[in-house]
């Protein structure tokens, strides 16, 4: 063996030994966040900002309709660190009184009402009758038989049952007294039923199976965010969406008045005249019933979260100055005063950032 070859072999062995002694990169903490589809853009920006401030954390966002988010947590028993929904009422309704079979404890013990929104009607320049749209004729346009209108499935997405509320609140005031029937009669295999709630309001029964007929002009999708692509492709003319989402995607907005957009403070007596009940077998033990009120987004850390301390820190970041600025930049402001349900159960780090719900 030549001297040169021996030198090369020795050098190679030294390099191999050195590589074996090199420190293993520290694994990042995965933080799993399940959130409502209307939070996609602000929460993706929040992910980037939080990871920049915490390079040892890998935020893993996943988005669904709000009731589907609940299902992942309470029925599929997925390991989730943060749950954020477009309706704060879902957390106490579906997580407080249901126990995780693995622990025997409720899925959640507290919830924060942290942000709001407004419901609006999205459309594009290609939408039928787009050049005619006004606040005076929007309801008449929506009921035209050649106009395709999209709403999220109210069994899975909060914007879906809120859209149903808007139709009942509008009829007889902003629109004809039979608006709901004009819009939905004959559209579904099993009808959506309207009955009095015994208090001067309207109860909307959503059947367990909600399928549109072949020739229906109403289009249903599992999450409101799925309607955006149909609008942009021209397969839909109009869709009920949150104003933040409409603005984020640069769509045209037919704004709803305060008494209909479900986004104004102090109008819950009016909004509460509409109630949606889901006749959904999956929730037979819970019987979800949603009474109209100002839109409120909810957030919590499930009791079985794999990384609860990091999850709490993430929520504190969301409610802090940088998180608020991010949400505001995506037209999705956080309440000036975030309120807490079961304040005494809220983690100590979050308590100074919130007040107890009335």
Image: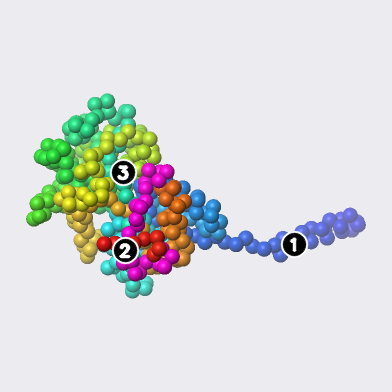
Q: What secondary structure is found at the residue carrying circle 2?
A: strand
Is 9 on the left-hand or right-hand side of 313?
right
Q: Is residue 127 above or below residue 296?
A: above
Q: Going from the N terminus, do you reach mark 3 or mark 1 first?
A: 1
Residue placed under numbered mark 1 in the picture: 18
Are the two marked residues, 3 and 1, in contact with CB atoms closer than 8 angstroms? no
Residue 56 is situated, as x and y percent measured from the top left of the image, at: 55, 59
Q: Is residue 335 above or below residue 26?
A: above
* Residue located beneath label 3 in the image: 242
Nearest-to-viewer mark from 2 and 3: 2
Figure quadrant of the C terminus: bottom left
Task: Please report whichever mark, 2 or 1, sits nearer to the chain's N-terminal start.
Answer: 1
User: Disc 2 to disc 3, how far (Cα)?
Assistant: 27 Å
Q: In the image, which residues are magenta?
A: 328-350
Q: At which x and y percent is residue 48?
A: 50, 50
Residue depicted at 29% across the width and 44% down the height = 118
In the picture, measured across the screen, residue 3 lies left or right of residue 201, that is: right
Work out whether mark 2 precedes mark 3 in sequence or the reverse, and give the earlier one: 3
| Residue 269 in picture, x, y percent from top left | 17, 52
């Amino acid at each position: 063996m030549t001297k040169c070859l021996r030198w090369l072999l020795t050098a190679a062995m030294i390099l191999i030994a050195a590589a074996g002694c090199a420190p293993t990169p520290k694994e990042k903490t995965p933080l799993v966040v399940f959130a409502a589809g209307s939070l996609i853009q602000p929460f993706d920006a929040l992910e980037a900002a939080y990871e920049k401030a915490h390079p040892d954390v890998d935020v893993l966002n996943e988005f669904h309709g709000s009731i589907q988010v609940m299902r992942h947590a309470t029925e599929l028993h997925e390991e989730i660190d943060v749950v954020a929904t477009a309706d704060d009422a879902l957390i106490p309704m579906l997580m407080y009184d249901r126990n995780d079979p693995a622990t025997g404890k409720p899925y959640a013990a507290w919830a924060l009402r942290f942000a709001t929104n407004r419901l609006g009607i999205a459309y594009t320049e290609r939408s039928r009758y787009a050049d005619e749209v006004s606040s005076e004729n929007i309801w008449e346009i929506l009921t035209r038989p050649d106009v395709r209108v999209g709403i999220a499935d109210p069994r899975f997405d909060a914007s879906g049952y809120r859209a149903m509320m808007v139709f009942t609140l509008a009829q007889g005031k902003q629109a004809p007294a039979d608006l709901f029937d004009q819009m939905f009669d004959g559209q579904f295999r099993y009808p959506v039923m309207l009955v009095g709630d015994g208090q001067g309001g309207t109860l909307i029964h959503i059947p367990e199976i909600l399928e549109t007929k072949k020739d229906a002009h109403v289009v249903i999708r599992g999450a409101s965010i799925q309607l955006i692509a149909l609008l942009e492709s021209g397969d839909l003319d109009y869709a009920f969406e949150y104003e933040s989402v409409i603005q984020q995607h640069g769509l045209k907005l037919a704004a709803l008045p305060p008494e209909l957009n479900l986004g104004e403070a102090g109008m819950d007596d009016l909004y509460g005249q509409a109630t949606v009940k889901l006749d959904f077998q999956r929730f037979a033990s819970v019987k979800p019933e949603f009474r109209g009120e100002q839109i409120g987004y909810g957030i919590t850390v499930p009791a079985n979260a794999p990384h609860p301390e990091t999850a709490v820190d993430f929520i504190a970041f969301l409610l802090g100055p940088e998180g608020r600025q991010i949400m505001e930049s995506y037209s999705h402001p956080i309440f000036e005063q975030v309120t807490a349900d079961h304040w005494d159960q809220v983690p100590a780090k979050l308590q100074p950032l919130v007040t107890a719900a009335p």
